[in-house]
Structures are given as C-alpha cells and as structure tokens.
Amino acid sequence: MENRDQRHERGGEIMSQIVIQNLNKLYNPNKPNAFYALKNINLSVEDGQIVILKGVSGSGKSTLLSLIGGLSKPSSGEILVNNQNIAKLPDIMSSAFRHQKIGFIFQSFNLLEGLSVYQNILAPLALTSLSKEAIHEKVSLAMQLANIEHKKDQNVGSLSGGERQRCAIARAVVMEPEIILADEPTANLDKENSFIFIEILKKFKALHKTVVIATHDTLFDGLECIDRCVQMRDGELLG
Amino acid sequence: MKFLAMLATAFCVLYLALVVHAFSFPTQKKAEELTALSLHVKDVKPSLSFPTHAYQRFVYVP
Amino acid sequence: MRTKGLSMFRKNFVEYAILLLFKDRNDHLFSFLIFSFIVFILSSVLFISDSLQYDLIQSIKAQPSIVVENTRAGRAYQMHEGYVYDVSKITGVSGVEGVVDGYHYFAQKRLWFHIIGDASLAKDEMVIGQGVQKAMAELYYEDEFHFLTEERLIRVKINKIAPKGTNILSNDAIFLNPNTARAVLGMEIDEYSKLYVSVPNPNEVGNVALKIVEIYPSAKATSQADAIGAVRHVYYYKGGIFMILYVIALVSFFILLKNQISLVYGEKKKEIAILRSLGFCIKDIIALKFIQNTVVSVSAYLLGVALAYVYVFVFNAPYLRNIFLGSELENSISLTPVVDLNLLFLIFLFGVIPFLAFVILPAWKIAISDMSEAVKS
C-alpha cells in the first residue's frame, strides 16, 4: 500500500484532501418535523490526517460522514474531495468514487451475514476486472493488515465483536482507498478490542491514509496518531 | 462461474436425452396404426371411460 | 485488453452474484420449487392435451362427408334400411354406408364397452382394445367372451388385441362383424346405428345435410368439417379442469410473487444498503438481482418443462391422464411426444418476466433511497 513518501516521489502535492464548504443537511423538508442535521459546516482535512469528530449522539457526526462518503446528498453546500465536488455527482460516478476512494467502517460492522470473512472482504472486488490471483493477493494483504487471516474461512456470524470489526476493517481497506471513514468504530467493542483498533489506526497513519472518525469514546483523547479533534453539537462545528 | 457452467451442462445433457427420446419414439408407426384403424372406424371418437357424463364435460367440449 | 478487462469484470460480478444467491439459498430454493411446480403443471397439461389431439387428428383422415344419427326422445335410436334408401336418393350423394355402433354393459365389472361393427371381420372374429382385454382377463375371459343379452348368451372368440398405439380410439372398443354386433346390441338384421354418407362435392355437403334433416327431422347430420372441428377443439378450455388448473397456477404464482417481494425487503434491504456503501451503484444492484433471479427462474422453468416431459411422455402421465381419459377402464396409452414451442414460450414469457419484475422493481426502489439511515441501523 502506497504511503506519503512514495506519493512525494511521484511528485504529488500534500494539500487539503477533503474540503467542506457551507454544508447543510435538512431532513423532512417542507414537513412539520423538518430539522437540520447539519448547519453551515466548514471543514477541511489534509491528506494523511487523522481527524476525530467528537460529540454526543445526535450531534450530526454520522450524517457528516455519510455526506463525505457520498451515501447521501447535502441540502446545500459543497464537499470537495481531491478537488472534485462529490455532492453533485450522479449515482454512477458517486458510487465509483465511493468504491475507489472511500473505505467505510460502521458501528454495527455491516457485514454480509451468511458469508465467510474472505467472502465479505471480496465484495468490493466484485466490481473490478482483476484476475483471480490479483484478487486473492489483495484480500490477503487486507486480512494481514487487520490481523484476521486466521479466520478467513469462518462464517462471520460465528465471530466475536472484535473479529467482526477487523473483518469490516479489512473490507474497508481491500481497495486501498485514500480515505477511511469510521462511524463509532469502538462503540460495540470491549477495551481489549478497542486497543486493537487503535493499533490498526496507527497502521493507517503509517500508510498515510486520511481517516475521519466519528466517536464519543474518550479512548481517542490525547492519542499521538490523532492530528485534530473537532467538536460537534446540534449539527454545528464548535470552535 | 463453475456453478453456472455445471448447471448449463446438466440442462444440456437432460434436454439432449429428451430430444433423443422424442426422436426415438415410433411416431410414424403409431400414426400408421391409427390411420389403419380409422379406415375401419371412420367416425372416430376418443376412447374415454368416465363414470358419468358430468365428469366428461369437465374436460371436453359438451 | 479492454475487452478482456470488461469480461473479467463481468465474470467477477457474476460470480459474486451467485455467491450471494447461495447465501440465501433457502429463500431462493422456495421460489425455485414453486415456480418449477407451476411450470410443471401447466406444461404437463399442455403436453397431454396436445398429444391426445395430435393422435385424434391422425384418425380423422377417413372421416365421412356426413354422419347421420337418429334420435328418439333425445336418445340415440337405430335406423332401418329405408333411411339408407332415402338418403341415397338425395342429389349429390354418391354412396351411403350403414354401420353398427353402440355400447354393451359388462355388468360384472360395471363397465360399458364400445361395440363397433367392422365389415372386414368374419362372424366369429373379435378384436378388442387393450383396456377391454385387461377388464375381461380379470374375470378370466382370456380366449373367448360371453355377451349376455336379454335373449341369449353369445360366445365369441378373442382373436386379436388392437395395437397399443391405437389405444386413444380402441381402448374401450370391441370390433365385431356387423351381424354379431347387431346380435349383441339387440338390433334387427336391417338396422343401423349410423349412416356414413359420401358427398363428392364438398360445396354440396351443407345442402345434403339440410335435406337429410328435412326428410328425417329427428336425425342429426354432422358434416365432415364439423367433425374435424370438434376434434381440433376437443378440450373445453374455459371450464372444468382447466379452470381448476388456472386457479392452482394463479394461487401458486401469487405465493411465489409474495416470496419474491419479501426477498428484497427486510434483511435484504440492509444488504442492498451495505453493497451501496461499498460502491455498488443502482445499476449494479439491479444487475445483481437480475442475475440471481434469472438463474433461479430460468432453471426452474427448464426443470419444470423437463419434468413435465418425463412425466407425460416417459411415464405416460399417471393420474393426470385419467382426468383426460377417465379412470373406469385402465388406459395404458402411450402418449406421442408433441411439443408446442409457441405455448411453452408463452408460459416462459408470462412466468419469468413477472417473476423478475417482482424482484427488480422493489430492489430498484430500495437502491434509489437514502442509504445513510439503512447503514446505521
């Protein structure tokens, strides 16, 4: 997996990878129960940074992650990723962007039940034209990074919480995305597995991945690998 | 793809067997026997054995 | 290279679609079985009716121009020599042949045998159908048979069994010399059950039939065209067994469609959201569902048709053929393989297309909705 130094050698600039300008998200518009999940968000995340979005439940963290990942569209504003406004992309391009550039890690892991670890990690590669050997290599690398290779043929239904998380991480990185978005990644993990996640986060740092984590877990406070911490409340950024 | 290939092969073999059966059926011989019989029984009716007419009307034009 | 890349993409995608299909194999298996059953039932009935009709059509080649039958009080009644004379005098008639035809009640087995006079048989010759032979053999009538009439007992030797291939016509038939047949049926020597009238000019047939009915108002004159038409439309598709069949197929189909819809909602809604979050676009989701359900529906269809073929043409449709032929007399008919590709294609069209639509439409509806809530739940 390519890191920052390798990108330097290529002649690539280090600049803001994610730029969010005047972002608003209004749910149930024109209805009595309309509300703003996000209000006038302005945020930029540099290439290779690990940023924490902190806030209580309902502060808009998950909504912001969804918008950055192109899972939903904003009501107004811009989201520029690598200078491309993803808010206005049609579905095919938005999906291609998500496929190649974004790796999602969800709170509830969102694995495909009934499939094995290997088969779950394989999912994004179904949209590629890689050969069987190349696919196998990519999946193996992803499993190694997440330290889940020893469970590759096991059905995800029989995995522990920590193992399911690591399977989800492997799936998120198998396409070698530039950006990882993690929504409450440690909410369903015990302390031990949470520390394992922190170790994996350090690997992301070494690989110069841009990571945005939405969390209210105090475990992330004061970690060396975290570049910035942004507070959110009621859909707005504080400070 | 292996599954699809196996499925396709299985159906090809099955339908080949059905085609072989269809062609090996003595259709011509049966047609000749029926024609020969109908020369004696010119006004043919199908050989039905329903207990009553009501049952027969269930299937056939009254 | 681009073509190779494209085909590799398709291959990877199709393989993953099949993987997901096996993941939910129980649900898909249910759909598969129901659909196969529907196709099996419809195809079996189609095969049987087409096969029987094909055989009947083989046998109408020697159909007379006009068949005259007499009635009294609404029931079939015999005709005497005078009828032959009167009809033969009608302009346009080239010949009249009187035949003996009727039913004899075999009381011991409570069966009716169809007695047919065949002038090519000698007085003591008898040819019987296979069904008749089996019924007689059960009561040990193997070499000869005793006809019990009001007046006397008539003994006739069983000379020959009609070939199996003619069972559609001969299964319940006993072919006798006309005079022997008269004796069995209690008819006089100059009496006939039917008259076969030959009219060389087909345009005259209608007129001749009218004239016959004018002379004998209680007689029924059936033209060749009517008789052939009756064979071609022998099945009453609007009523009875076919209606029951349609209802069974329809009810099964609705159960199937309900299952198909539920295959998309519920847990599967989450699955679609997960795939969307991994980069599957709406087109990909629809393609996925299309591939999975095409595999299920097409293979269910092919299996249904193949099983129907084997059931009807290899095993001669046990139980179902009794609906078409009656079960009082065992009919070991061998059904001629007749396959109406047009109708099979119609079954495919009206089966597979709704099957696919009832999955793809809900999947599309879910795929276009906001995924952010679905992935959080």
Image (cartoon, coloured by chain):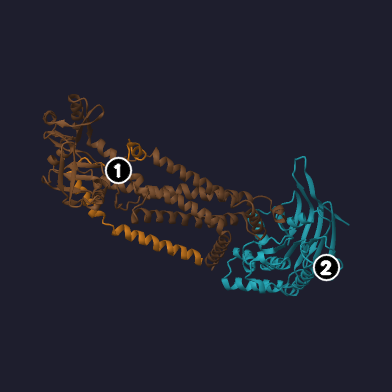
Chain identifier of the orange chain: B
Q: Quadrant of residue B19?
A: bottom left
Split into 4 quadrants, where in the image is the N terminus of chain A? bottom right
Q: Position of residue C290 (x, y in %)?
A: 54, 55
Left/right of residue C244 with respect to residue C268 in the rendered view = left
User: Would residue C259 be seen by someone viewing this image from the given angle?
Assistant: yes
Q: Position of residue C81 (x, y in %)?
A: 11, 31
Q: Quadrant of residue C217?
A: top left
| Residue lying farthest to the right in this orientation | A239
Relative depth, front residue between C98 and C347: C98
User: Would residue C287 be seen by someone viewing this image from the given angle?
Assistant: no
Left/right of residue C319 with respect to residue C141 in the rendered view = right
Kind of residue indicated by mark 2: Ile
Q: Position of residue C16 (x, y in %)?
A: 57, 63
Split into 4 quadrants, where in the image is the C terminus of chain A? bottom right
Q: Quadrant of residue B40?
A: top left
Looking at the image, which residue is at 50% across and 65% down?
B3
Crowding near the residue tagged with mark 2, few <14, some 14–19, many ≥20 C-alpha atoms within 10 Å: some
Chain identifier of the cyan chain: A
Task: Point out which mark residue B49 bears.
Answer: 1
- Residue ID for mark 2: A226
| Secondary element at tag 2 | loop
Left/right of residue A221 with respect to residue C304 in the rendered view = right
Chain identifier of the brown chain: C
* Label 1: chain letter: B
Foreground: disc 2 or disc 1: 1
Kind of residue indicated by mark 1: Ser
Q: Position of residue C260 (x, y in %)?
A: 56, 50
* Label 2: chain letter: A
